[in-house]
Image (cartoon, helix red, strand yellow):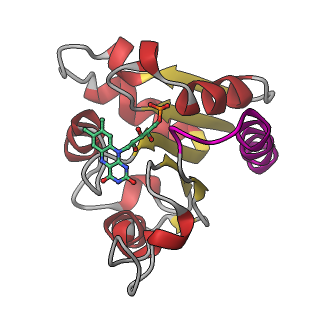
């Protein structure tokens, strides 16, 4: 079965971190990588098509920059339109998040500057995966995204590609 990587970045043309991750994912055989804002600039999601792609995938990847401790709006729209409340259609699939964040790793702690861990920030996705009977994989996190050194960015992109293999 295929891996479906959906990249939700409203300004891919200005992206460095998500661009590097997207390029790394695209090198992995069996992986279909899509720029979702390019696909649905008007937010009119083709629900039947998205459900078919998701049903065909063993691993469903949501890749996005963290915006206000959440995802860019199109991912929420995609979830609301594509996931089914009766829940059964994606049972047994795996969900992987690949998230870039401006904040530093050490700041994402309950007693840190951000006041919560990244696991706490991403809890709604874990809960959604659980509700849908999907396995929630350990997220791939890229911190300090706007300042990360080229070498470190390449290392995270390499880890991402390994996870997708
Ligand atoms: C509207 C907006 C909201 C953001 N909110 C957060 C946030 O809540 N936490 C955080 O760590 N970084 C936040 N950032 C920083 C982005 O996550 C960061 O710029 C992005 O991950 C860089 O990836 P890119 O090079 O692919 O654009 C925000 C950036 C923007 C533009």
Q: What residue is at 61 percent from the left and 66 percent from the top?
A: 138
Q: Report the front residue among 100 and 56.
A: 100
Q: In which quarter of the image is residue 21?
A: top right
Q: Is residue 49 visible?
A: yes
Q: What residue is at 38 percent from the left and 85 percent from the top?
A: 110
Q: Report the front residue among 89 and 71.
A: 71
Q: Quadrant of residue 45?
A: top left
Is 94 placed left or right of 88 in the picture?
right
Residue 139 location, x and y as percent?
57, 60
The quadrant of the image that shows the N terminus is top right
Q: Is the magenta stretch mostly helix, strand or loop?
A: helix
Residue furthest to the bottom in view is: 111
Q: Can residue 131 be seen in this view?
A: no
- Verify whether residue 152 appears in magenta: yes
Write the start and end of the magenta stretch as one range.
145-165
Q: Is residue 67 above or below residue 69?
A: above
Quadrant of ligand 1 in image: top left
Q: Quadrant of residue 149?
A: top right
Q: In this view, does 64 lie above or below 39?
A: below
Q: What residue is at 54 percent from the left and 72 percent from the top?
A: 106
- Verify whether residue 161 appears in magenta: yes
The quadrant of the image that shows the C terminus is top right
Q: Report the front residue among 102 and 138.
A: 102
Q: Is residue 16 above or below residue 165?
A: above
Q: Report the front residue among 12 and 53.
A: 12
Q: What residue is at 37 percent from the left and 60 percent from the top?
A: 88
Q: In this view, does 81 lie above or below 59?
A: above
Is 165 placed left or right of 118 in the picture?
right
Residue 53 location, x and y as percent?
48, 31
């Amino acid at each position: 079965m295929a891996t479906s990587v959906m990249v939700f970045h409203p300004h891919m043309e200005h992206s460095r971190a998500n661009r590097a991750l997207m390029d790394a994912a695209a090198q992995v055989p069996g992986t279909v990588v899509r720029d979702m804002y390019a696909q649905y600039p008007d937010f009119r999601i083709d629900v039947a098509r998205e459900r078919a792609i998701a049903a065909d995938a063993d691993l469903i990847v949501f890749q996005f920059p963290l915006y206000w401790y959440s995802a860019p709006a199109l991912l929420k729209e995609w979830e609301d339109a594509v996931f089914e409340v009766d829940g059964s259609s994606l049972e047994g699939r795996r969900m992987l998040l690949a998230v870039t964040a401006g904040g530093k790793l050490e700041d994402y702690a309950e007693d840190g500057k951000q006041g919560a861990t990244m696991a706490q920030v991403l809890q709604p996705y874990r809960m959604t995966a659980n509700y849908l009977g999907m396995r929630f994989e350990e997220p791939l996190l890229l911190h300090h995204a706007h300042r990360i050194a080229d070498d470190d960015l390449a290392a995270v992109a390499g880890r991402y590609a390994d996870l997708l293999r």
